[in-house]
Structures are given as C-alpha cells and as structure tokens.
Image (tube, coloured by chain):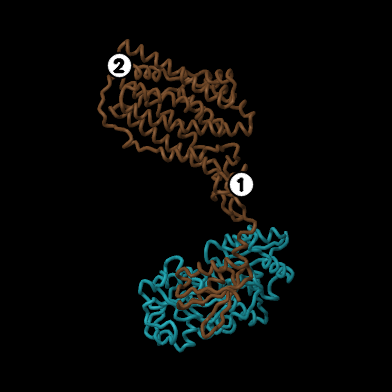
Chain colours: A cyan, B brown
Amino acid sequence: MAKPLLMGAVAYAPKVVTIWEGFKEYFRRHDFEFDYMLYSNYERQVEAQLDGSIDLAWNSPLAWVRAERMARAHGLEARALAMRDSDRDLCSVLVVRSDSRVATTGELTALAGQMIGFGALDSPQANLIPRDHLRAQGLLAGRDYTARRFDELGGKHGDHIGGERAAALALMAGEIDAAWMIDGNYLAFAREGILPAGATRIVARSGSYDHCNFTSICGISAASDEMVVRFTELLLAMNWQDAQVRPLLELEGLKAWLPGRTSGYDLLIRAVDDEKFYDAEGNILATDYRY
Amino acid sequence: MPPIIDIENLGLDAGAHLLIKYGLGAIPPGGELRVVGSSPGWEVQLAAWCRAQGHGMSMQQQDGHPVATVIRGAADAGRWHDAAHAGHGDAALPGAVADQALSCWGLAARGATVEAGAPDIHFRLDRKDEVWADTAAVLYAQAVAAQWNPATAIDWNEPFDLPAAVEDAVAQLMTYLIENEAAALVVPARFLGQVHPHFREIQALLAIQVADEARHIEVFTRRLRLKGREPALSTAGGQASLKTLLDEPDFSVAGFLLSVLGEGTFVSLLNFLHLHAPDPVTRQIARLTARDEARHVAFGMSHLLWRLQQEPQFRTRLANAVQSRNDALANTAGLNEEVFDALILIAAGEFTPQAIAAGYVRVQQLIADMAEGRRVRLERLGFDKEAALHLAALHTRNFM
C-alpha cells in the first residue's frame, strides 16, 4: 500500500470521526490513499504540521493565521488548497433584545456600560473579530462596556458553537444586553427557538471574512506535490448530486468545495494583532488561553 | 428584469426564507430573484441563508434602498437527482402499486419522491403477488367503521344465572376461544412487520385485524370472569394445531389456513353461540365477534382469489398445505373433549337428559355446517367439488 496522505483535523465533536472516515472511503474509491489524525486542539495541530507529522491540515481561520506565520518564520510558505462554499464571506452579528435601547441603525455608543456576551476566547467569529469591530468603533472592553465570555472547549477555535449558544440563551434570559454570533448561527438559533421570532434585533455586523481551509506547507511534508494536487482535484470533484457523497458534504456543511483563497483573512489578522493573540512568528501571546 | 419579492418587515429569523424559497422555485438554477425588505438586518440574514443553501447573492442600492439579487444555486434541485418515484398514492390509478416494492423506498409514502442514498430497509414481503388484495382498502374502511367499544357495546350488567355446570362449560369454551384468538392475533401481527409499507392498504388491514383480535380476547376474558370463574383447560392437541398456523412462513398459505379455513369455521361457531348460548352476554359477544371474523375471512378470500388469478398453480400448494397440516396433526387428539362437551352443554342450556339430547344434535349440525362452509369457500377458490369436499374434511378438528 502506498504511503497515505496524512491530514490533521480537530475533534471538536463526535461527528468528526464519521466525516473523515467517509472522506477516507471516498478517496479510496478513487484509488487515493488518505488517512487522518485527530487533534484535541488547533494549536497542537498547527505545531504538528510544522514538525512534519502531518502532510496537510483542515484548519480554522485562526489556525490558518498561525500556520501561515509559523511557516513564514521558518522561511516556508503556507498555502490554502481548498475551502467550502460556506466558508466564504461570513460575518458576525451583534444581537440585542428587541426592546434594547441600542438603535438598529446608528452609533454603537448606546452600548456604553452594557454587558456584551462573546464566545470562546479563541473564537474568530464570536470573540476576536467582534472585539476588533468594537475597538474600531472606539469601544473597548472594561472601559466602555463589560465583556462576558462564554468560553467552551478552548483550543477548538469556536468550532464548537456551544459558547455562542450559551450567549444567546443568556441574552434571552436577560443576563446580558447583547451577544455576538456568526450570521448563520443567528438563523440556526432562531430555528431552534432559542431566539424567538421578533424578540431580537441585529444592531451591528462585522465586515466579511473567510473561514476554514485545507492548509499545506511547501517543503516540510514528505508527501509529493502530485499527491497534494490529486487530493485537491478529488476534493473539488465531490458532487452534491452524488448520493454517496452528499451525506458527507451535509455533515461538513457545504454544497461544493472551492479553491482556497487567502484574501478573506485580513479582518482576522488585524484582530489577532490588536487583541494580541499571536505574535508575528505565531507564538501564543494570550495569557489566559487554556486548550 | 428579474422577478422581485418584498419580504416587508419579516426577518429570516421569523420565516421570511419561505417567501424567498417560493420565489426561487419559479426560476431555473442560475436565474435571478430580487429581494427587498425592511426588517432590521434582513440583508445579513439573507446572506447567511443563501450561503447555507448554496445560492449566490449580491447587494445593490436602488433609490437609496438596499436590493439583494439572489442567484438560484443547483443544490436544492441536485438533491433530487436520481431520486426514485415510488408508485402513486391512489391505488386505483394505473401503475400505482408496484409489482415489486424496492428496499430503497423504505418507509416513504407510496407516491413520494425518495432521495437517492436513502437507507435500504428490507421487508420480506415486498412483492405484490405475495400480499395484495384489491378489496383491502374497502375492507379496512369497513373495519374502521365497524369498531365497537366492549365497555358500551355489550350490556355486562344484564342479569342472568346459569346452572353451575353450564357456567363451567361457558368458562371452558371461553378458555378455548381466548387461546384460538391469540393465534389469530399473532399470525397477522408477525406478517405485519414484514409487509413492505408500499402495500399500505394491506398493512392497515392487518393492523386493524390485530386490534380486532385483541378486543376479542378482552371480551372473552371478561365473560369468563363475569361469574368469578378462572380459565379452564388448555390441551396439548389444541395448541399443536394452532402452532402449525404460527409456523407457516408463507403469507398466502397462512391466510388460507387461518382466515379461509380457521376463522371461516369460527364464524360458524360464533353464529351458533349467537343463536344458542344460554346467556345474553355470551350471545351479544358472539354476534359482535362473528362480524369482525367475517371481515377477516373476506380479506383471506380476496387475497387468495387475487393470487390465484396471477398464479393458478398456487392452488396445488394450498391443497398440499391442508394435507401437510393434517399429517402433522395426525397424532394429536384434535378438539379438546372438554370443549366439545362444553358446546353440548351450552347448546343444551340446562343439565337434563332432554336438553342434552337437543344440545348434542345442535352441535352435530354445527360441525356439519362448518364443513359445508369450508367446502363452499374452497369451491369459490376454484377447487372442484370433490377436492373441496376432501380438503374441507381434512381441516383440523380443533376448528381454527
């Protein structure tokens, strides 16, 4: 048997095993040997990719930022091979109860003195980008508003949406005045009934940003370029109309794979710097980060 | 100019996606739909929804107001690529009921569009010729309309007092009836879970047949206990006879032995009790249960007539089944002697030589009537007179 292309992924939920076992079978059906290694957190996964333990990684946007910085610090180049159609142009929304004093359009200064709920410390969508957004509007945690963090499963970079859900529940329970969440989760929490129809309003939205990607780092993995190219080809060929493939795409939350792009991470890069999460070499700066 | 819809102040957190979905349904993949709205943050909600659904979206300003352009993606239609169509809901339409129901149709309603990749659910009885009867829907409707409530349909308080020996005989007969109805419940119940749901009329009819038998067991038990008696005797021969019904794996053969021959014979028995039972409660019970049993017989007949029309040689298999059952029971005692005696006493109504003589004659007549009923039904199934007489006589002495 040929040496398989080894991918790292983070086990943020039990379904992760189902997903990658399914992908393994898909690749094998196409005569391509593929295997995966699960990590409990993205920090260890990024480090593993840099030491050559894995050939590529299914990275969160924050993991991409770190991998890119660490690769550059080693004189290497990280590449985003592919991403989901649903990874492009996301945004985060700040949600208040309908009766909030914060107006739907206009200044966020009305948030002054209020308690705002954020997701996990390492969540790009529910903590880093939202804090950066408020900072850009002149609002700083501790000075202009009180931040309450709903920290769940550190190291998963917010993939586990438990923090956002807990914040939404706290918002409706009146424990906090506003909550940040990813736009898609706002609709999901409405469907679940956590946010009753008409009971909330969106008062701010971040700029658009991209989410996960398959990351490879040239010159460090033992896998040949041909293998990486073949992997990408097979991935992009996964067809929603194919009944064998569709359940995997549904589990992973996409309709089609798209070529990777790196133009959608600027907002997060700024947030990482402003919030002092990683330094320019990818070292972790956040002192209260547990993973 | 693409079509435009106004979701007004309805957010996508409150159901606006339905309006957009409906609008997109009218245009082909790749086509455009304009959306305007006024609920706070509707644009960002729409963007999230489109991303999740695989539709493209862009925003423009028109006269100072935001207008979204949604480009219908291929994912919603793509899901139904290679979908299976499982017949038609109305069995009367041509081609509605498939000769072979597919395992990939699973539990889907007949006529539904079933997504490719749905799990295979295997039902042993998946061929129309194995189970079908054109009258099933009508018989089911009749069964539903004819359901009765044991608590109110029978006057349990109507006063009567039988001689102790006759009441004992009633208890013995009820013990026998309960045992037989247990078999009549278990046999269709076992097939019920094996019939492909595509044949939903058959599934429904079997289900209500099972419910009928449960009710019969209830009323026979209640009559047995009415005067404080305990269940009486259950014989090895009686149970051996019933076990042959439970052991029959073929739906048609089991229906033939149980419904056409067994329950058909029971209709005669229950009619006999309706006429000759010594107390009003037993007579009422017999009338109501006989009506249900007659429906079960009608389904058995209807299915077999249908099957024999498709497969005339199946008649030989039916004849062999009666013969085999007779052979299998050759070494058993047949009808419980206690039951036979109980019937005489019940028909006599009192414990005197004259009454017993009359009861005896009536039971002899009953047994002749039962055999004659079987012969008539066998002839209706296409057996010639001689074969029908022969097979009618081979039927188990246990009646069921």
The residue sitting at 65% across, 75% down in the picture is A260
Q: Amino acid at mark 2?
A: Glu
Q: Horizontal and vertical percent for residue B154?
A: 32, 33
Number of the label disc, if any, that sits on residue B350: 2
A121 to the left or right of B126: left
Task: Give the chain of mark 1.
Answer: B
Extreme residue in the top direction: B353
The residue pinned by badge 1 equals B102
Q: Amino acid at mark 1?
A: Leu
Considering only order in the chain, which callout, 2 or 1, is on the residue closer to the N terminus?
1
Residue A122 visible in the shown view: no
From the viewer's perspective, tell me whether residue B358 is left or right of residue A223: left
Mark 2 Cα within 10 Å, few/some/many (few <14, many 20+)?
A: some
Q: Residue at x 61, y 63 (%)?
A: B77
**Where residue B57 appears, x then y in whole percent?**
58, 75
Q: Is residue A42 above or below residue A139?
A: above
Q: Which mark is residue B208?
A: none
In the rendered image, which quarter is residue B363 located in? top left
Report the front residue among B367 and A14.
Answer: B367
Q: Residue at x 42, y 66 (%)?
A: A193
Q: Does residue B246 appear in this view?
A: yes
> Label 1's element?
loop
Comparing A190 with A128, the one in front is A190
Q: Nearer the viewer, residue B10 or B322?
A: B10
